[in-house]
Image: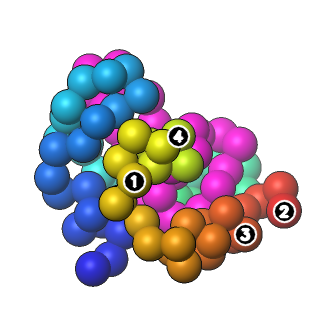
């Protein structure tokens, strides 16, 4: 399952609402482009392809949705970032 497919179901957001995140397939930051998701309630943006200081980290969502990423996926996400 790719990262986008994982967000096609309701998840608990950091705003404590169960939501279906909107997937934005391409958004730019100073370092390149990303796939991001946006909460329809709090409108927070989360980068789901790699860590980026311009967006919230998916790790915040993983604390509340523990089965979202495997350990390997979490490691890959946390080591693939602009500031690493």
C-alpha span from label 4 to label 1: 10 Å
- Pointer 3: what residue? 79
C-alpha span from label 3 to label 2: 7 Å
C-alpha span from label 3 to label 4: 16 Å
Label at residue 60: 4
Q: Dot 2 lies on which element?
A: loop
Q: Do the residues labelled 3 and 2 touch (CB within 8 Å)?
A: yes
Q: In the rendered structure, which disc, 3 or 2, sits on the residue that comes first in sequence? A: 3
Label at residue 84: 2
Looking at the picture, tell me which residue is in the foreground, 79 or 66: 66
What residue sits 67% from the left and 63% below the top? 78
Image quarter for residue 10? top left
Looking at the image, residue 51 lies above or below residue 13? below
Image quarter for residue 51? bottom right
- Pointer 1: what residue? 66
Please give left or right for residue 16 compared with residue 77 in the image.
Answer: left
Q: In the rendered structure, which disc, 3 or 4, sits on the residue that comes first in sequence? A: 4
Looking at the picture, tell me which residue is in the foreground, 79 or 69: 69
Residue 53 percent coordinates (x, y): 71, 43
What residue sits 48% from the left and 43% below the top? 63
C-alpha span from label 3 to label 1: 19 Å
Residue 52 percent coordinates (x, y): 67, 50
Dot 1: within a 10 Å radius of its alpha carbon, few (fewer than 14), some, or many (20 or more) residues?
A: few
């Amino acid at each position: 399952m790719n990262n986008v497919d994982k967000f096609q179901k309701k998840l608990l957001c950091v705003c404590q609402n169960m939501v279906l995140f909107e997937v934005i397939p391409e958004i730019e930051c100073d370092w390149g482009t990303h796939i991001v998701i946006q909460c329809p309630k709090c409108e927070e943006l989360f980068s789901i392809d790699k860590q980026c200081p311009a967006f919230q980290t998916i790790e915040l969502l993983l604390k509340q949705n523990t089965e979202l990423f495997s350990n390997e996926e979490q490691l890959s996400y946390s080591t693939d970032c602009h500031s690493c």
